[in-house]
Image: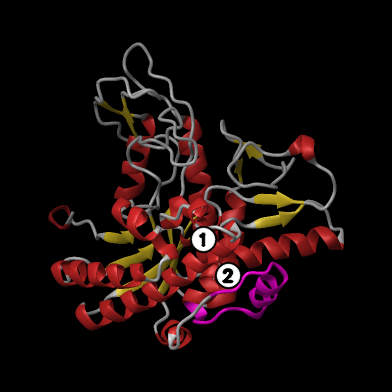
Amino acid sequence: MLKYGIEPLVTLSHYETPLDLTRKYNGWYSRKLIGFYTRYAETVFTRYKNKVKYWLTFNEINVITHSPYTGGGILVENVPNQSAEQIAYQGAHHQFVASALATKLAHEIIPDVKVGCMLARMTTYPVTNHPDDILLAQHKNDLNLFFTDVQVRGEYPKVMERYFKENNIQIVKEVGDDEIIKQYPVDFISFSYYMSLSVTTQSEEENILGNMIAGSVKNPHLQTSDWGWQIDPKGLRYTLQDFHNRYGKPLFIVENGLGAHDKVEEDGSIHDPYRVDYLRQHMEQMKEAVKDGVGLMGYTAWGPIDLISVSTNEMSKRYGFIYVDQDDEGNGTLERSKKDSFYWYKQVIQTNGEDLSSSPKVKVSQ
Protein backbone atom coordinates (compact mmCIF):
# COMPACT_ATOMS: atom_id res chain seq x y z
CA MET A 1 0.00 0.00 0.00
CA LEU A 2 2.75 2.43 0.94
CA LYS A 3 4.56 1.61 -2.30
CA TYR A 4 1.55 2.92 -4.24
CA GLY A 5 0.93 5.96 -2.05
CA ILE A 6 -2.03 4.46 -0.19
CA GLU A 7 -2.44 5.46 3.46
CA PRO A 8 -3.23 2.31 5.51
CA LEU A 9 -6.19 2.29 7.90
CA VAL A 10 -6.09 -0.87 10.02
CA THR A 11 -8.84 -2.38 12.16
CA LEU A 12 -7.49 -4.45 15.03
CA SER A 13 -10.56 -6.70 15.26
CA HIS A 14 -13.10 -7.03 12.46
CA TYR A 15 -15.56 -9.77 13.46
CA GLU A 16 -12.65 -12.11 14.04
CA THR A 17 -12.48 -13.14 17.68
CA PRO A 18 -10.12 -16.15 17.55
CA LEU A 19 -12.19 -19.33 17.64
CA ASP A 20 -9.98 -20.86 20.32
CA LEU A 21 -10.83 -17.93 22.63
CA THR A 22 -14.53 -18.60 22.03
CA ARG A 23 -14.07 -22.27 22.86
CA LYS A 24 -11.98 -21.70 25.98
CA TYR A 25 -13.44 -18.48 27.40
CA ASN A 26 -16.69 -17.77 25.47
CA GLY A 27 -15.16 -14.80 23.71
CA TRP A 28 -15.59 -11.28 25.01
CA TYR A 29 -17.97 -12.39 27.74
CA SER A 30 -14.78 -13.25 29.58
CA ARG A 31 -12.66 -10.46 31.01
CA LYS A 32 -9.56 -12.48 30.14
CA LEU A 33 -9.86 -11.30 26.54
CA ILE A 34 -8.85 -7.78 27.56
CA GLY A 35 -5.34 -9.04 28.32
CA PHE A 36 -5.12 -11.14 25.17
CA TYR A 37 -6.29 -8.20 23.05
CA THR A 38 -3.92 -5.64 24.54
CA ARG A 39 -0.96 -7.99 24.10
CA TYR A 40 -1.96 -8.46 20.46
CA ALA A 41 -2.41 -4.69 20.00
CA GLU A 42 1.00 -3.96 21.49
CA THR A 43 2.56 -6.54 19.18
CA VAL A 44 1.12 -5.11 15.96
CA PHE A 45 1.62 -1.49 17.06
CA THR A 46 5.29 -2.23 17.62
CA ARG A 47 5.61 -4.09 14.32
CA TYR A 48 3.88 -1.44 12.18
CA LYS A 49 4.65 1.75 14.11
CA ASN A 50 6.57 3.25 11.19
CA LYS A 51 3.99 2.27 8.57
CA VAL A 52 0.49 2.69 10.01
CA LYS A 53 -0.73 5.92 11.62
CA TYR A 54 -4.50 5.26 11.62
CA TRP A 55 -6.06 2.45 13.64
CA LEU A 56 -9.57 1.31 14.59
CA THR A 57 -10.07 -0.80 17.69
CA PHE A 58 -13.26 -2.80 16.93
CA ASN A 59 -15.32 -3.01 13.77
CA GLU A 60 -18.99 -2.04 14.25
CA ILE A 61 -18.65 -2.50 18.00
CA ASN A 62 -22.42 -2.17 18.54
CA VAL A 63 -23.16 -5.32 16.52
CA ILE A 64 -22.35 -7.33 19.64
CA THR A 65 -25.86 -6.51 20.92
CA HIS A 66 -27.48 -7.71 17.67
CA SER A 67 -25.25 -10.75 17.21
CA PRO A 68 -23.07 -11.57 20.25
CA TYR A 69 -21.19 -14.26 18.31
CA THR A 70 -20.38 -12.05 15.32
CA GLY A 71 -19.42 -9.03 17.39
CA GLY A 72 -17.80 -10.77 20.31
CA GLY A 73 -17.32 -14.48 19.71
CA ILE A 74 -19.92 -15.12 22.44
CA LEU A 75 -22.21 -18.16 22.53
CA VAL A 76 -25.12 -16.97 24.68
CA GLU A 77 -26.38 -20.52 25.14
CA ASN A 78 -23.23 -21.23 27.16
CA VAL A 79 -24.24 -18.71 29.83
CA PRO A 80 -27.23 -20.10 31.74
CA ASN A 81 -29.78 -17.96 33.56
CA GLN A 82 -28.77 -14.70 31.86
CA SER A 83 -30.49 -12.79 29.10
CA ALA A 84 -28.82 -12.32 25.73
CA GLU A 85 -28.77 -8.55 26.38
CA GLN A 86 -27.04 -8.98 29.73
CA ILE A 87 -24.40 -11.18 28.12
CA ALA A 88 -23.86 -8.87 25.13
CA TYR A 89 -23.56 -5.66 27.14
CA GLN A 90 -21.12 -7.35 29.51
CA GLY A 91 -19.00 -8.30 26.51
CA ALA A 92 -19.27 -4.74 25.20
CA HIS A 93 -17.95 -3.40 28.52
CA HIS A 94 -14.88 -5.60 28.21
CA GLN A 95 -14.37 -4.28 24.68
CA PHE A 96 -14.66 -0.68 25.92
CA VAL A 97 -11.88 -1.28 28.44
CA ALA A 98 -9.75 -3.07 25.84
CA SER A 99 -10.29 -0.26 23.32
CA ALA A 100 -9.21 2.37 25.86
CA LEU A 101 -6.10 0.41 26.79
CA ALA A 102 -5.24 -0.11 23.12
CA THR A 103 -5.62 3.63 22.54
CA LYS A 104 -3.22 4.25 25.43
CA LEU A 105 -0.69 1.80 23.98
CA ALA A 106 -0.93 3.27 20.50
CA HIS A 107 -0.12 6.75 21.75
CA GLU A 108 2.84 5.42 23.72
CA ILE A 109 4.29 3.39 20.83
CA ILE A 110 3.45 5.23 17.58
CA PRO A 111 4.36 8.87 16.86
CA ASP A 112 1.48 11.01 15.55
CA VAL A 113 -0.98 8.11 15.77
CA LYS A 114 -4.74 8.51 15.49
CA VAL A 115 -7.03 5.86 16.98
CA GLY A 116 -10.73 5.66 16.18
CA CYS A 117 -13.80 3.74 17.22
CA MET A 118 -16.10 2.22 14.62
CA LEU A 119 -19.91 2.15 14.80
CA ALA A 120 -22.54 0.62 12.55
CA ARG A 121 -24.59 3.82 12.46
CA MET A 122 -28.28 3.06 12.25
CA THR A 123 -29.84 6.51 12.09
CA THR A 124 -33.50 6.04 12.95
CA TYR A 125 -36.44 8.26 12.00
CA PRO A 126 -39.95 8.37 13.50
CA VAL A 127 -42.56 7.29 10.96
CA THR A 128 -44.96 10.02 12.11
CA ASN A 129 -44.80 13.20 14.18
CA HIS A 130 -46.70 11.49 16.97
CA PRO A 131 -44.70 12.07 20.18
CA ASP A 132 -44.60 8.33 20.87
CA ASP A 133 -42.94 7.71 17.50
CA ILE A 134 -40.46 10.53 18.11
CA LEU A 135 -39.54 9.17 21.54
CA LEU A 136 -39.15 5.65 20.14
CA ALA A 137 -36.80 6.89 17.41
CA GLN A 138 -34.82 8.85 19.99
CA HIS A 139 -34.56 5.72 22.14
CA LYS A 140 -33.28 3.66 19.20
CA ASN A 141 -30.69 6.33 18.40
CA ASP A 142 -29.60 6.44 22.05
CA LEU A 143 -29.04 2.67 22.04
CA ASN A 144 -26.98 3.00 18.87
CA LEU A 145 -24.95 6.02 19.99
CA PHE A 146 -24.31 4.54 23.43
CA PHE A 147 -21.19 2.93 22.01
CA THR A 148 -19.70 6.18 20.72
CA ASP A 149 -20.82 7.98 23.88
CA VAL A 150 -18.61 5.66 25.92
CA GLN A 151 -15.61 5.64 23.58
CA VAL A 152 -15.65 9.37 22.78
CA ARG A 153 -16.99 10.98 25.96
CA GLY A 154 -15.41 8.36 28.19
CA GLU A 155 -18.42 7.49 30.32
CA TYR A 156 -21.69 5.59 30.37
CA PRO A 157 -24.60 7.97 29.62
CA LYS A 158 -27.33 8.35 32.22
CA VAL A 159 -30.01 7.24 29.76
CA MET A 160 -28.32 3.84 29.50
CA GLU A 161 -28.07 3.51 33.26
CA ARG A 162 -31.86 3.78 33.32
CA TYR A 163 -32.17 1.29 30.44
CA PHE A 164 -29.98 -1.22 32.25
CA LYS A 165 -31.97 -0.84 35.48
CA GLU A 166 -35.34 -1.26 33.76
CA ASN A 167 -34.15 -4.31 31.81
CA ASN A 168 -32.39 -5.99 34.73
CA ILE A 169 -28.94 -5.62 33.15
CA GLN A 170 -26.06 -5.40 35.59
CA ILE A 171 -22.63 -4.60 34.17
CA VAL A 172 -19.84 -6.18 36.22
CA LYS A 173 -16.90 -3.78 36.39
CA GLU A 174 -13.58 -3.95 38.14
CA VAL A 175 -12.14 -1.07 40.13
CA GLY A 176 -10.47 1.33 37.71
CA ASP A 177 -12.52 0.42 34.63
CA ASP A 178 -14.40 3.72 34.56
CA GLU A 179 -11.17 5.67 35.01
CA ILE A 180 -9.48 3.81 32.13
CA ILE A 181 -12.42 4.49 29.80
CA LYS A 182 -12.46 8.15 30.83
CA GLN A 183 -8.72 8.70 30.50
CA TYR A 184 -8.20 7.17 27.04
CA PRO A 185 -10.98 8.17 24.62
CA VAL A 186 -10.55 7.72 20.87
CA ASP A 187 -9.19 10.47 18.63
CA PHE A 188 -11.85 10.19 15.93
CA ILE A 189 -15.11 8.46 15.07
CA SER A 190 -15.45 6.10 12.13
CA PHE A 191 -18.66 4.43 11.07
CA SER A 192 -20.49 2.43 8.45
CA TYR A 193 -23.52 3.87 6.72
CA TYR A 194 -25.69 1.90 4.32
CA MET A 195 -29.25 2.98 5.07
CA SER A 196 -31.53 4.74 7.51
CA LEU A 197 -34.23 3.04 9.57
CA SER A 198 -37.78 4.05 10.51
CA VAL A 199 -39.82 3.02 13.55
CA THR A 200 -43.34 3.52 14.82
CA THR A 201 -45.45 2.62 17.82
CA GLN A 202 -48.34 1.90 15.47
CA SER A 203 -48.99 -1.51 13.90
CA GLU A 204 -46.95 -1.70 10.69
CA GLU A 205 -46.30 -5.43 10.44
CA GLU A 206 -47.10 -5.53 6.73
CA ASN A 207 -44.40 -2.94 6.10
CA ILE A 208 -41.55 -4.60 7.97
CA LEU A 209 -38.37 -4.34 5.92
CA GLY A 210 -36.43 -7.33 4.70
CA ASN A 211 -33.21 -6.29 6.43
CA MET A 212 -31.17 -7.38 9.41
CA ILE A 213 -32.51 -4.72 11.78
CA ALA A 214 -35.53 -5.96 13.70
CA GLY A 215 -38.47 -3.59 14.01
CA SER A 216 -37.66 -1.20 11.19
CA VAL A 217 -40.53 -0.39 8.84
CA LYS A 218 -40.62 0.88 5.28
CA ASN A 219 -40.10 4.56 4.60
CA PRO A 220 -42.34 5.38 1.59
CA HIS A 221 -40.10 8.31 0.65
CA LEU A 222 -37.05 6.14 -0.07
CA GLN A 223 -36.02 3.58 -2.66
CA THR A 224 -35.15 0.08 -1.54
CA SER A 225 -32.23 -2.15 -2.53
CA ASP A 226 -32.52 -5.72 -3.81
CA TRP A 227 -32.19 -6.85 -0.19
CA GLY A 228 -34.69 -4.46 1.35
CA TRP A 229 -32.26 -1.84 2.63
CA GLN A 230 -33.57 1.68 2.17
CA ILE A 231 -31.34 3.99 0.14
CA ASP A 232 -31.02 7.35 1.87
CA PRO A 233 -28.12 9.59 0.71
CA LYS A 234 -29.47 12.65 2.52
CA GLY A 235 -29.58 10.55 5.65
CA LEU A 236 -25.77 10.41 5.44
CA ARG A 237 -25.60 14.20 5.53
CA TYR A 238 -27.94 14.20 8.53
CA THR A 239 -25.85 11.51 10.22
CA LEU A 240 -22.60 13.42 9.70
CA GLN A 241 -24.11 16.62 11.07
CA ASP A 242 -25.60 14.73 14.02
CA PHE A 243 -22.21 13.20 14.91
CA HIS A 244 -20.54 16.58 14.51
CA ASN A 245 -23.01 18.36 16.77
CA ARG A 246 -22.95 15.62 19.40
CA TYR A 247 -19.19 15.06 19.69
CA GLY A 248 -17.19 17.68 17.75
CA LYS A 249 -14.66 14.99 16.79
CA PRO A 250 -13.21 14.25 13.33
CA LEU A 251 -15.32 11.75 11.36
CA PHE A 252 -14.39 9.00 8.92
CA ILE A 253 -16.87 7.05 6.77
CA VAL A 254 -15.21 3.65 6.49
CA GLU A 255 -18.06 1.59 5.00
CA ASN A 256 -20.64 2.69 2.44
CA GLY A 257 -21.92 0.74 -0.52
CA LEU A 258 -24.72 -1.11 -2.24
CA GLY A 259 -25.33 -4.85 -2.17
CA ALA A 260 -27.01 -5.78 -5.45
CA HIS A 261 -27.47 -8.48 -8.09
CA ASP A 262 -24.95 -8.01 -10.92
CA LYS A 263 -25.29 -9.51 -14.38
CA VAL A 264 -22.35 -10.54 -16.56
CA GLU A 265 -23.12 -9.74 -20.21
CA GLU A 266 -22.17 -12.02 -23.10
CA ASP A 267 -19.12 -9.90 -23.85
CA GLY A 268 -18.01 -10.14 -20.21
CA SER A 269 -18.94 -6.58 -19.27
CA ILE A 270 -20.84 -5.77 -16.08
CA HIS A 271 -23.01 -2.67 -16.14
CA ASP A 272 -23.89 -1.45 -12.64
CA PRO A 273 -25.21 2.11 -12.96
CA TYR A 274 -27.28 1.55 -9.79
CA ARG A 275 -24.04 1.22 -7.78
CA VAL A 276 -22.53 4.32 -9.35
CA ASP A 277 -25.73 6.26 -8.62
CA TYR A 278 -25.77 5.08 -5.00
CA LEU A 279 -22.17 6.06 -4.33
CA ARG A 280 -22.33 9.33 -6.27
CA GLN A 281 -25.43 10.50 -4.41
CA HIS A 282 -23.86 9.69 -1.04
CA MET A 283 -20.65 11.50 -1.96
CA GLU A 284 -22.64 14.55 -3.02
CA GLN A 285 -24.20 14.62 0.43
CA MET A 286 -20.77 14.22 2.04
CA LYS A 287 -19.73 17.41 0.25
CA GLU A 288 -22.81 19.18 1.56
CA ALA A 289 -21.93 18.07 5.10
CA VAL A 290 -18.42 19.47 4.73
CA LYS A 291 -19.96 22.78 3.63
CA ASP A 292 -22.05 22.58 6.82
CA GLY A 293 -18.79 22.56 8.79
CA VAL A 294 -18.42 18.83 9.46
CA GLY A 295 -14.81 17.69 9.92
CA LEU A 296 -14.72 14.70 7.58
CA MET A 297 -11.34 12.94 7.53
CA GLY A 298 -12.00 10.51 4.73
CA TYR A 299 -14.08 7.88 3.02
CA THR A 300 -13.59 4.25 2.06
CA ALA A 301 -16.22 2.34 0.10
CA TRP A 302 -17.47 -1.14 0.93
CA GLY A 303 -15.94 -2.72 -0.86
CA PRO A 304 -13.44 -2.92 -3.70
CA ILE A 305 -14.06 -6.58 -4.51
CA ASP A 306 -17.05 -8.94 -4.26
CA LEU A 307 -17.14 -11.07 -1.14
CA ILE A 308 -19.64 -13.09 0.85
CA SER A 309 -22.04 -10.74 2.64
CA VAL A 310 -21.93 -11.18 6.42
CA SER A 311 -25.59 -10.15 6.77
CA THR A 312 -27.01 -12.86 4.50
CA ASN A 313 -24.14 -15.30 3.82
CA GLU A 314 -24.57 -14.81 0.07
CA MET A 315 -22.04 -14.15 -2.67
CA SER A 316 -24.89 -12.95 -4.88
CA LYS A 317 -25.24 -9.86 -2.67
CA ARG A 318 -22.39 -8.08 -4.40
CA TYR A 319 -20.79 -4.83 -3.25
CA GLY A 320 -17.56 -4.67 -5.23
CA PHE A 321 -16.19 -2.70 -8.15
CA ILE A 322 -14.58 -5.98 -9.17
CA TYR A 323 -16.72 -9.04 -9.97
CA VAL A 324 -15.61 -12.43 -8.64
CA ASP A 325 -16.84 -15.54 -10.47
CA GLN A 326 -18.31 -17.47 -7.55
CA ASP A 327 -21.89 -18.38 -6.69
CA ASP A 328 -23.66 -18.80 -3.35
CA GLU A 329 -22.60 -22.46 -3.16
CA GLY A 330 -18.92 -21.65 -3.66
CA ASN A 331 -18.80 -22.78 -7.28
CA GLY A 332 -16.88 -20.76 -9.87
CA THR A 333 -13.46 -19.98 -11.31
CA LEU A 334 -12.78 -17.06 -8.91
CA GLU A 335 -11.73 -15.03 -11.95
CA ARG A 336 -12.06 -11.27 -11.50
CA SER A 337 -13.66 -8.75 -13.87
CA LYS A 338 -13.90 -4.97 -13.66
CA LYS A 339 -17.42 -3.57 -13.48
CA ASP A 340 -18.38 -0.17 -14.90
CA SER A 341 -18.23 1.15 -11.34
CA PHE A 342 -14.51 0.30 -11.27
CA TYR A 343 -13.75 2.91 -13.89
CA TRP A 344 -16.06 5.43 -12.25
CA TYR A 345 -14.42 5.00 -8.84
CA LYS A 346 -10.98 5.23 -10.42
CA GLN A 347 -12.05 8.61 -11.78
CA VAL A 348 -13.27 9.67 -8.33
CA ILE A 349 -9.94 8.73 -6.76
CA GLN A 350 -7.89 10.42 -9.47
CA THR A 351 -9.79 13.69 -9.01
CA ASN A 352 -9.90 13.42 -5.21
CA GLY A 353 -13.69 13.39 -5.37
CA GLU A 354 -14.03 16.46 -7.59
CA ASP A 355 -15.43 14.58 -10.61
CA LEU A 356 -18.49 12.54 -9.63
CA SER A 357 -20.04 12.49 -13.11
CA SER A 358 -21.79 9.26 -13.92
CA SER A 359 -19.58 8.28 -16.86
CA PRO A 360 -15.79 8.29 -16.70
CA LYS A 361 -14.17 10.69 -19.14
CA VAL A 362 -11.65 8.04 -20.12
CA LYS A 363 -12.54 4.36 -20.05
CA VAL A 364 -9.58 2.03 -19.79
CA SER A 365 -9.80 -1.24 -21.69
CA GLN A 366 -10.28 -4.38 -19.66
**Residue 233 disc label:** none
The verdict on residue 119 being magenta is: no
Q: Residue at x 79, y 62 (%)?
A: 134
Write the start and end of the magenta stretch as one range: 152-171
Are the residues flagged by discs 1 and 2 in contact, CB closer than 8 Å?
Answer: yes
Say left or right for 301 vs 141: left
Is residue 160 at least partly visible in the picture? yes
Residue position for label 2: 146
Q: Residue at x 17, y 71 (%)?
A: 49
Front residue of this view, candidates 334 and 44: 44
Residue position for label 1: 62
Is residue 360 at least partly visible in the picture? no
Determine the image quadrant of residue 107: bottom left
Q: Amino acid at mark 1?
A: Asn
Packing grade of label 1 (10 A; few <14, some 14-19, many >=20) is many
Rendered position, 120 above or below 147: above
Q: Residue at x 65, y 67 (%)?
A: 142
Quadrant assignment for the N terminus: bottom left
Rendered position, 40 above or below 24: below
Which of pointers 1 and 2 lies earlier in the amino acid sequence? 1
